Image (cartoon, helix red, strand yellow):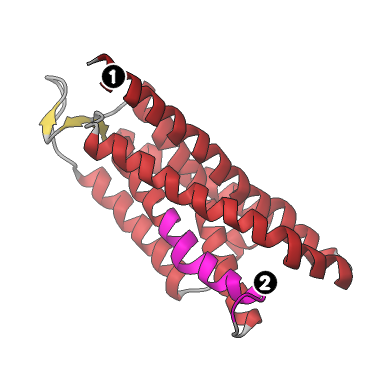
Amino acid sequence: MEELFIYNVLVRWGHVLLGIVWIGLLFYFNFVQTEYLKIADPDAKSDVMKKLAPNALWWFRWAAFFTFLTGLILLYFLQVLATTEIIIGSIMGTLMMLNVWGIIWRNQKIVIGLKEGDAFAAGAKAALASRTNTLFSLPMLYFMISSAHSPIKSYFMGTPATGTDPGYLGLDFLIICVAIALIELNAIYGKMYPVIASVRSVITSSLVLTVVFSGIAFYI
């Protein structure tokens, strides 16, 4: 029992640490590197893409993967108490990880010259997925944190954790999942809308999305 407790604590610690690295690099790419490259001299831009970006992308994609893996261990193998919030946060986190490996990294390999292709088109696809991950990041973090401190509905292996919980994922969950799906579909097939195009707009939109999702989860 003590070994399981220690293992649980270590996995939780690793999950949080890796998540900090992942989201920190996500913010770095969106708020720092991208903005710098817009104004950088050609030589400086070339140096970033050849030397800095590949190293940062290595840490970025593997931090994303192992954040997901440790979360999976916590949720499914250690049977951590599941809540409406943790399930919603896990859905967004999983989509974000898939965006990293399936869209961002695949297209960034073309942008930084590791793979042949249309660098302009690849850059646009990677940028849209990266902005989408930034949009998801604040509500994802909110739901992950609130799940431990102020859960709305709790579930454990499909059974209500308290006598007052309804024990099902209701209309609030469905509405939020539909919204998440529409946002993700835009990341795959859509375009860069003004609400996420700039640093200010994506931060504002992410905050608004957090308020909207939390309001739906609380009031519906």
Write the residue at 13% across / 28% down. Answer: 160
Instruction: Describe the element under mark 1 as helix, strand or loop.
Output: helix
Q: Residue at horizontal 60%, vertical 81%?
A: 121
Residue located 66% across and 62% down the image: 54
- Indicate whether 44 appears above or below 158: below
Query: Mark 1 Cα within 10 Å, few/some/many (few <14, many 20+)?
Result: few
User: Which residue is at the front of the view, 87 or 205?
Assistant: 87
Residue 111 lies in the magenta stretch: yes
Left or right? Give the position of 41 relative to 159. Answer: right
Q: Is residue 185 left or right of residue 4?
A: right
Q: Is residue 100 magenta?
A: yes
- Left or right, 215 with reference to 128: left
The percent coordinates of residue 112 (x first, y second) are 67, 72
| Quadrant holding the N terminus | top left
- Magenta: main secondary structure equals helix
Residue 207 screen position, x and y as percent: 54, 43
**Residue 216 shows in this picture:** no
Q: Quadrant of residue 163?
A: top left
Confirm or deny contact between disc 1 and disc 2 (CB under 8 A): no
The residue that appears at 61% across and 65% down in the rendered structure is 194
Residue linked to disc 1: 3
Residue 63: x, y in percent? 51, 47
Residue 135: image x %, image y %?
52, 52
Task: Please tell me the numbered disc located at residue 23.
Answer: none
Q: Identify the magenta region.
A: 96-115
Q: Which is nearer the eye, 52 or 119?
A: 52
Disc marking residue 112 = 2
> In the figure, residue 115 lies in which quadrant?
bottom right
Of 106 and 149, which appears nearest the observer? 106
Q: Quadrant of the C terminus?
A: top left
Q: Amino acid at mark 1?
A: Glu
Q: Earlier in the sequence, mark 1 or mark 2?
A: 1
